[in-house]
Image (tube, coloured by chain):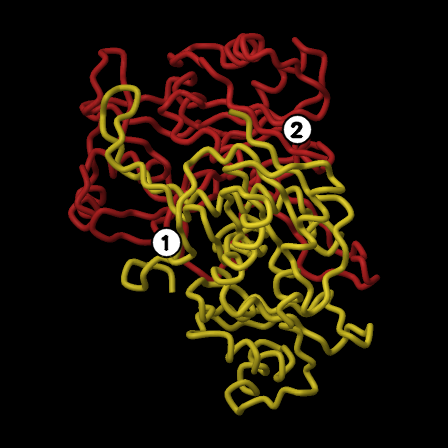
Chain colours: A yellow, B red
Amino acid sequence: MTLTLTPLQGFPLVKPGDSLAGLVLQALLVNHISLQDGDVLVLAQKIVSKSEGRLVHLSHVTPSQRAKDLADASEKDARFIELVLQESSEVLRVRPGTIIVEHRNGFVCANAGIDHSNVCGDDGQSEDWVLLLPEDGNLSAGRIRKELEQTTNTHLGVLVIDSHGRAWRNGTVGISIGMSGMPGLVDLRGRPDLFGFHLQVTQVGAADELAAAASLVMGQASEGLPVVHVRGFPYPLREGDLSELIRPRDMDMFR
Amino acid sequence: MTLTLTPLQGFPLVKPGDSLAGLVLQALLVNHISLQDGDVLVLAQKIVSKSEGRLVHLSHVTPSQRAKDLADASEKDARFIELVLQESSEVLRVRPGTIIVEHRNGFVCANAGIDHSNVCGDDGQSEDWVLLLPEDGNLSAGRIRKELEQTTNTHLGVLVIDSHGRAWRNGTVGISIGMSGMPGLVDLRGRPDLFGFHLQVTQVGAADELAAAASLVMGQASEGLPVVHVRGFPYPLREGDLSELIRPRDMDMFR
């Protein structure tokens, strides 16, 4: 079966309080797409965060001493680092220009996913506005999914993605930060292969593979393609969440 | 523009010496797909390696003392570890059940990408056969691309992928191990976003995002879907190779 990923054209700029489900439904209409059972909607973190009012103006942030120290080490704004610390449960690495942390929600990433590059607040100015990740990506996905399903009478998956750097490899890739109605991992352990042997390592990070695929067609979400419609996701939809994709600390060799 | 990924149905089992380009062209015909300029063919490492005769029988391998020591630490077959060492330039981590290395070609992965789970040799037996990665994934991709382009008079990209585990996250994802005719990284630095600001972190691992997307529809390559036809790759094709995606050691915080 063919997998198709269609970025929705003409998605509007999102403001705090906007109903993302409503905006997605409008955009689907404009793009002549009717939702079917098994479809997945992939949303860029940025629009989810904006709709949830996760914009913070740095003038409202008072850095702690620890934030000031880490700001020196990372050569970043101490108020920004203060927010990174508030959004994190552990600091893994600090270098000039870089701070790698474990986010509250369990995943490892730079800057706790806080976006300072192209964020615009109510005043239309960008310099001192930053955008935090959603409070809980799974809950965000669940709310949007529920509204989409009720309106269209379908069974869907919803995936919220961000774009992260990686250990060992250059370039960002799309990655899951929350989901609803779809598997994070697909466990193929024990399924016989063509030769009749049982596969060994066969836990597939299916949601992350879809996140990367959707990110590819979003390009930069800032260019206006923050929602991707997916048809043909090759695994059955089920209840699932981000925790499936988080490696337990005691199984993690790279901290 | 919609991105479509179509796994080619009915791809035959590949034997050493087979022309992969020929098999791909046949499979495209059977699947009623005519190649167009800008299409990308994604091939699972397994069939590339098999066509190149990278099967090794462990009875032909004599482990060194270092291999024996690492076999004890990793609880793996010393002959298997000997091959891992021959295919690697650095050992990063050894734990029971796991050995993480830098492959000769520069990327970090478990077992140097050597597959022991579902490999079949000429004798139809699996137990002691293993499959090494291609000697050079870029060259493999280039050879296949050249033959495909000459036969069809098109400009194409060819990507060879494997399925790797990751730091910090559960589940394997598809990842590039060689390419030809397409970018590894897409550099968006300096491109203004919707607000007119210049983006900061905007090197996108486009080939790895496509690798993950294609891996999603392959499922397990062993199940018979090792080739994926891609239409709508959203960046211009150009000469590119795997080295773009390899983070230099001095920029790598996780070794």
Residue B181: mark in rendering = 2
Residue A168 percent across, percent down from the top left: 48, 52
Amino acid on which disc 2 is placed: Gly
User: What's the residue at 59%, 49% (across, down)?
Assistant: A151
Tell me: residue B184, above or below residue A146: above
Residue B126 percent across, percent down from the top left: 22, 21
Give left or right: position of A126 versus A150: right
Structural crowding at the residue carrying mark 1, measured as other residues with C-alpha within 10 Å and reported as few (<14), some (14–19) or many (≥20): some
Chain containing the residue with disc 2: B
Residue A228: mark in rendering = none
Structural crowding at the residue carrying mark 2, measured as other residues with C-alpha within 10 Å and reported as few (<14), some (14–19) or many (≥20): many
Using the rendered image, report if marks 2 and 1 lie on a common chain: no
Q: Quadrant of the N terminus of chain B?
A: top right
Viewer-side residue, A26 vs A59: A26
Write down the quadrant of residue A164 in the picture. bottom right
Residue B208 percent across, percent down from the top left: 55, 41
Q: Which residue is mark 1?
A: A244
User: What's the residue at 50%, 36% (across, down)?
Assistant: A233
Residue B75 percent across, percent down from the top left: 17, 45
User: What's the residue at 32%, 21% (across, down)?
Assistant: B55
Tell me: residue B10, above or below residue B160: above
CA distance for labels 2 and 1? 36 Å
User: What's the residue at 47%, 38% (across, down)?
Assistant: B174
Tell me: residue B141, above or below residue B235: above
Q: Secondary structure at mark 2?
A: loop
Amino acid on which disc 1 is placed: Glu
Viewer-side residue, A129 vs A47: A47
Q: Secondary structure at mark 1?
A: helix
Chain containing the residue with disc 1: A
Count the marks: how many? 2
Write down the quadrant of residue B150 in the picture. top right
